[in-house]
Image (tube, rainbow, N blue to C red):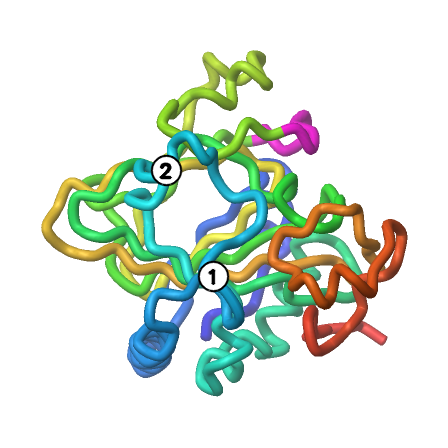
Amino acid sequence: MNNNLSSQDIAQYRRDGFLVIENFLSPDELAFWRTALDEAVKKRNGNKMPDRKEVYGKGDENDKSYYDNVFDQLINLWQDNEKIKQIMLDERLGKMAAELAGVDGIRIWHDQALIKKPWANPTSWHLDTPYWSFSDRRALSIWVALDDATYENGCLFFIPESYQKTTFENPGIGKNMGAIFTTYPEFKTSKSIAAPMKAGSCSFHNGLTIHGAHANMTPGFRRAMTCAYMPDGNAFNGTPNILSEEAISRLKVGDLLNDNEITPLIYTKI
């Protein structure tokens, strides 16, 4: 695993709000991640979460059929697949996230398989953190390409430096590719940066970086494995997101999100 970040890498991430790392996984590691994902997807049998099909606060209900053809989304596979758990709880990933974010400790918020099927719709410009049950401008995600992510099949695009000005307002992911610019009109004329990646490469991006993805204009799949990271010490903001009804019943706004059964601490300097 190409997990050593240079000072230049960290500076670039903190300037732009994203960073691409080529050849992140070795060929053997890539094969292991692919096998783990295939097994986890088969076991899920269509459920987005270990305990339910739907996720709170995702997408626009009026655009449900469109949204369902943006990508197949399976969340918290680490909770019901041992191979994915081994991958996601790797301290090396946590250390990279902590170094980029400039924090002492990192917890998993949720992992996520994002699979664009053949001819899938584009992923409209959006933010990540406003969906989550905590509010932290340093939160970030890793996005690992398990197939080549190309201009033709749905590679990511980022608007550099946008995270420095965006807030926790978010119009969601619907049919309108540019809906986010009604909330953030200052970025409507910004130049986006494409991030095509060979399988085994990855990117990190801040959860407030405006990003999106092309449609899949091919008869093949574009598989990615991602993980959202929460800096340690964050508190519940009242948004349910991936939390179960049972977990929500035990929380009140302001309570620390520090249950290692739900949000495991995978790296700490201490």
Q: Which residue type does callout 2 highlight? A: Thr
Q: Quadrant of residue 144?
A: bottom left
Residue appearing at x 78%, y 62% in the figure? 249
Q: Examine the rendered structure and indicate whether residue 248 appears above or below residue 90.
A: above
Q: Nearer the viewer, residue 231 or 260?
A: 260
Q: Residue at x 46, y 12 (%)?
A: 189
Q: Residue at x 24, y 57 (%)?
A: 148
Question: Could you tell me residue 47's position as x and y percent?
Answer: 41, 65
Q: Residue furthest left?
A: 219
Question: Mark 2 falls on what kind of element?
Answer: strand
What is the secondary structure assignment of the residue under circle 1? Answer: strand
Q: Main secondary structure of the magenta part?
A: loop
In the orientation shown, which residue stands out farthest toward the right? 254
User: Is 13 on the left or on the right of 125, as rendered?
Assistant: right
Quadrant hosting residue 215: top left
Residue 6 x, y percent position in the rendering: 59, 59
Of residues 98 and 246, the one drawn nearer to the viewer in this rendering = 246
Residue 49 horizontal side relative to residue 170, left or right:
left
Residues packed near mark 2 inside 10 Å, few (<14), some (14 to 19) or many (20 plus): many
What mark, if any, has residue 123 been given in the picture?
Answer: 2
Q: Quadrant of residue 221?
A: bottom left
Q: Residue at x 58, y 79 (%)?
A: 90
Q: Measure how far apart labels 2 and 1 are at the Cα level.
A: 15 Å
* Residue, disc 1: 112
Q: Which residues are magenta?
A: 161-169
The mark that comes first in sequence, 2 or 1, is 1
Q: Amino acid at mark 1?
A: Gln
